[in-house]
Amino acid sequence: TDRYCVIGNPIAHSKSPEIHAAFAAQTGQDIEYGRCLAPLDGFADTVRSLAAQGYAGANVTVPFKIEAFTLATRLTARARAAGAVNTLSLAGGDIVGDNTDGAGLVADIVRNAGVALAGKRILLLGAGGAARGIMLPFIEQGPESILVANRTRASADSLAAGFGGHGAAVAACGVDEIAGPFDIVINATSSSLSAALPPVPASAFAKGTLALDMMYGSAPSPFMAFAAAQGAATRDGLGMLVEQAAEAFLAWRGVRPETKDVLTQLRK
Ligand code: ATR
């Protein structure tokens, strides 16, 4: 039995153990997956202790994804581009940092929502860690353009500049300069945590726009409600959560689980 866990603070609410248990049952993989509460000043010690206990890997969630990036002794290309790590593989004394958040969001949009990113005009709201994490996987899908808009314009500028050489048209703007409509609008701000609507004009949306909030909750976020009122199709971040877990499971076990039933189960 290989052991894994999710490390965070707080951690009690995490759905990852339930998701990975379902993946293990479905694929017949012999793993255990638990929760690990790390002290706010004790992330590195926690990871070293897990490695010493023989853990094969761990997921990392709030607020440790940047610290995990720093702690990793090796990084995947997508973790390096994200500047953050949500998946650790622990073997042979190495701490390998990966980031499956962006691939998870791409999988949710392409496979679950059935919307291709290739050739699309994408508006990305926010320029923090969540936004940065999805840039490279999105660019790899070949969109027509990605416009990064943020309340603090300078952060949007520096995020877009970091991905300027990657082949897609990446640009930045302030929230009062957003000129739509877009095919896909992603809310990567943390506004939904405070039940706020991020600054975005109604003109960003049209009938047929996919509006996706990376957050999820029991009710649609203000962003989703606003987008729906403009005729957009909306989606919350629960699919992304399940898909990033499937990508981590794939990285660890070499098999990608089916996600449909797990997502349906979580919605109940
Ligand atoms: P995360 O890791 O979730 O991305 P972060 O790195 O702190 O968290 O970034 C939070 C993002 O949400 C930022 O883009 C922030 O905008 P600022 O750079 O202007 O601070 C954005 N954000 C948070 N609350 C917001 C709100 N109420 N309206 C608009 N943007 C908000």
Image (tube, rainbow, N blue to C red):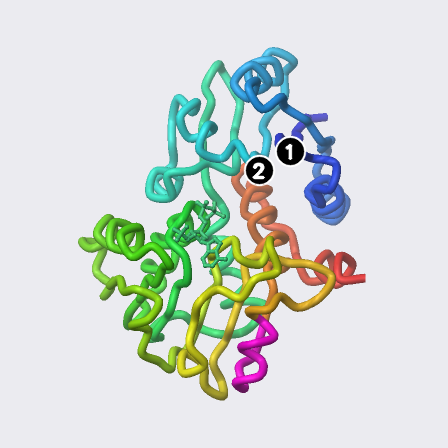
Q: Quadrant of residue 49?
A: top right
Q: Nearer the viewer, residue 94 or 216?
A: 216
Closer to the camera: disc 2 or disc 1?
2
**Spot occupied by residue 22 in the image (x, y as percentages of width and height):** 75, 47
Residue annotated with mark 1: 6
Q: Amino acid at mark 1?
A: Val
Give the extent of the magenta segment.
224-234
Confirm or deny contact between disc 2 and disc 1 (CB under 8 A). Answer: yes
Residue at position x 34%, y 63% from top? Answer: 149
User: Is 114 or 165 nearer to us in this picture?
Assistant: 165
User: Mark 2 or mark 1, which has the lower sequence index?
Assistant: 1
> In this rendering, would 29 be left or right of 117?
right
Residue drawn at x 45%, y 81% as measured from the top left? 202
- The residue lying at 58 percent from left, 80 percent from top is 228
Read off the residue under disc 2.
61
Local packing at callout 1 (Cα closer than 10 Å; few below 14, some 14-19, many 20+) is many
Q: Is residue 233 magenta?
A: yes
Q: SS for tag 1?
A: strand
Q: Quadrant of residue 8?
A: top right
Q: Position of residue 89 (x, y in %)?
A: 52, 28
Q: Secondary structure at mark 2?
A: loop
141 relative to 22, above or below: below
The Cα atoms of the two marked residues, 2 and 1, are separated by 7 Å
Q: For the view shown, which residue lies furthest in the left direction? A: 165
